[in-house]
């Protein structure tokens, strides 16, 4: 069964920008999400995906992801998603032998910047870059499924 092992942090400086790629613009929203599972559609210039994730149990979650047509993704975003569309730029930043993903949010969550690192094991040690601050992995306010529904000031707290 495919799993995602991920930790998430607030970004506290722009130092990551010296090492990043050009980034890509993402639009995503949720067909459904609750404590048990979520179904997300994501669209970018390089493709579209439908993702099913289990509710969080620590840093490990079941995750199934399928490529779909961009046309279908647009239709799902417009007609089936329960909440607002989340827009963000995603950058890939190498550090400590891993690739960090830094999300710079737009829209209602503008000003929020999060860094995520995917791990090979739940107990894997991580070399934290100096541009990350407080870990928010277990804070439900920082799940993408919740970000579009929150006020920006609450997310930066």
Image (cartoon, grey):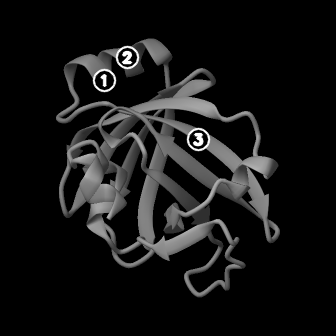
Residue found at the far top of this picture: 71
Residue 96 visible here: yes
CA gap, disc 3 and disc 1: 19 Å
Q: Residue at x 72, y 57 (%)?
A: 15
Return the mark for residue 142: none
Task: Name the residue carrying label 3.
Answer: 90
Query: Element type at marker 3?
Result: strand
- Dot 2 and dot 1 residues touching (CB under 8 Å): yes
Return the mark for residue 74: 2
Q: Residue at x 72, y 48 (%)?
A: 17
Mark 2 vs mark 3: which is more N-terminal? Answer: 2
Towards the viewer: 59 or 129: 129
Query: Element type at marker 1?
Result: helix
> In front of the other: label 2 or label 3?
3
Asked if 138 appears above or below 62 in the picture, the reply is below
Mark 3 vs mark 1: which is more N-terminal? Answer: 1
Query: x, y percentage for residue 100?
Result: 67, 58
CA gap, disc 2 and disc 3: 19 Å
Task: Name the residue carrying label 1.
Answer: 77
- Dot 3 and dot 1 residues touching (CB under 8 Å): no
Asked if residue 1 lies left or right of residue 108, the reply is: right
Q: Residue at x 31, y 30 (%)?
A: 85
Query: Element type at marker 2?
Result: helix
Towards the viewer: 17 or 26: 17
Query: x, y percentage for residue 136?
Result: 41, 71
């Amino acid at each position: 069964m495919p799993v995602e092992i991920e930790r998430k942090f607030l970004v506290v400086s722009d130092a990551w920008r010296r090492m990043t790629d050009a980034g890509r613009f993402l639009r995503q929203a949720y067909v459904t999400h609750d404590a048990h599972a979520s179904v997300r559609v994501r669209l970018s210039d390089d493709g579209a995906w439908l993702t099913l994730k289990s509710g969080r149990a620590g840093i490990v979650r079941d995750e199934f992801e399928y490529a779909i047509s961009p046309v279908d993704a647009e239709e799902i975003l417009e007609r089936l998603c329960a909440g607002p569309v989340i827009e963000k730029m995603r950058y890939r930043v190498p550090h400590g032998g891993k690739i960090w993903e830094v999300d710079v949010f737009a829209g209602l969550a503008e000003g929020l910047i999060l860094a995520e690192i995917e791990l090979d094991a739940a107990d894997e040690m991580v070399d934290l870059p100096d541009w990350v601050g407080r870990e928010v992995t277990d804070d439900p306010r920082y799940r993408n499924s919740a970000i579009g529904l929150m006020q920006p000031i609450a997310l930066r707290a």
